[in-house]
Amino acid sequence: MIFNGIDFDTYLKNYPDANGYFGSYGGAYINDDLKKAMAEITEAYFTICKSRKFIDELRRIRKEFQGRPTPISHLERLSNSIGNVQLYVKREDLNHTGAHKLNHCMGEALLAKYMGKKKLIAETGAGQHGVAIATAAAYFGLECDVYMGSVDIKKQAPNVARMKILGANVVEVTHGLATLKEAVDAAFEAYAKDYKNSIYCIGSVVGPHPFPMMVRDFQSVVGIEAREQFVEMTGELPDAIVACVGGGSNSAGFFSGFLNDPVDIYGIEPLGRGTKMGDHAASLKYGTDGVMHGFNSIMLKDENGDPAPVYSVASGLDYPSSGPEHAFLHKLGRVKYDVIGDDDTIDAFFTLSRLEGIIPAIESSHAVAYGMKLAKEMGKGSVLINLSGRGDKDMDYIIENYGIR
Ligand SMILES: *Cc1c(COP(=O)(O)O)cnc(C)c1O
């Protein structure tokens, strides 16, 4: 399918280009030491990850350890409560550890093993990526240093405990605001010093090339499975698909299976409390072109041009930018990016739980809320939503702030 001059038959092979660009977005804006390290990872990725042996081993891990393929569920009661449109969810909440993140963490860790690395280095904000990478490290018997701001360490005690139980070393970052941004800087710094022995494992389709490409490719299992399963279930393609977008990994993998199809694709960003700067994290909708964390994309900046403070009820979505591929697909118009606020998200969280017996992550509830809105507008047809994770991690927060509805 050709869309606005781009041939989507060959898109996944041709994008990004050899320098990591999706159109004008992407690249690697980093110092020379890190450039060397990234070049090593890129070369290893293209030789090792395309080999039969690597692919076979990753397939076996996906099946025997992660519990893939995850199913698609038809949301019959929710669909009937809205009208004639049939809603479906791809169940990444049933992937081991309860979200899609393990899909790329197992890929990154397997690559580390093949490259002979001894240690995984990562940063984490809410702790979800930290837990996934600690899980992968335990599985492969690798050391694991997870950098985390002291503010987040206090807030996310259960995830800190999980990482430690899994054998990871949680490194406290105390400078600046002591949250995710400082953790990213500290992790990059540690990696630059120790890249011969270790590998950096990023948490989404962000950062310098090759990460946006690698993470998308490791997450593409979600889109490949979903397309095949949906066609087998219903005999046709969905009319529309929906996923939430923080950094953009679950959506990038899910969308990749449908980019070449006549399917409407929606990426949903968090509108939080409203459109005022600081009240949301809708970077594609309200941001401008710029460079941060080593890549060129669309981002929310403050008056000094630094990453702006952002907010979302979902801690996994409060990032001031999105991966370069999303910026590209947004400018191209192939994916429509829209927003959903906190209130609609929390309504959808309770509705899906009550009508379907599935408690979604608050991140994923953004996609569910948008899918429900779309179903009302469409009147007929089908919508497939990527349910990126389960809501167990959000129980305390929900009870404390919203009670039980
Ligand atoms: C981390 C997380 C997200 C956001 O990350 P993406 O890279 O945008 O996918 C979404 N859903 C869940 C359940 C998460 O844990």
Image (spheres, rainbow, N blue to C red):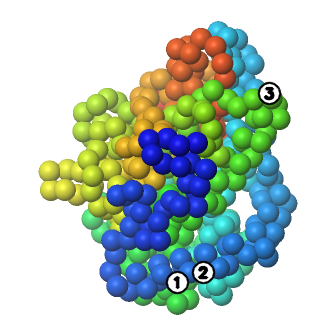
Decide if residue 158 is in sight here. no
Residue that label 1 marks: 40
Residue toward you, 362 or 382: 382
Residue that label 2 marks: 44
Q: Residues within 10 Å of mark 1 (few under 14, many from 20)?
A: some
Name the amino acid type tagged 3: Thr
From the top left corner, tell me how far across and down residue 35 is, in percent.
40, 81
Specify the quadrant of the image occupied by residue 107.
bottom right
Residue toward you, 354 or 100: 100
Q: Are marks 3 and 2 in contact (CB under 8 Å)?
A: no
Circle 1 SS class: helix
Q: Residues within 10 Å of mark 3 (few under 14, many from 20)?
A: few
Circle 3 SS class: helix
> Is the CB of the residue bearing disc 2 within 8 angstroms of ligand 1?
no
Residue that label 3 marks: 234
Q: Upstream in the sequence, badge 3 or badge 1?
A: 1
Name the amino acid type tagged 1: Glu
CA–CA distance between discs 1 and 2? 6 Å
Q: Are marks 1 and 2 in contact (CB under 8 Å)?
A: yes
Decide if residue 285 is in sight here. yes
CA–CA distance between discs 3 and 2? 40 Å
Left or right for 12, reference 247: right
Residue drawn 74% across the image and 46% down it: 225
Name the amino acid type tagged 2: Ala
Q: Upstream in the sequence, badge 3 or badge 2?
A: 2
From the top left corner, tell me how far across and down residue 166 is, in percent.
67, 68
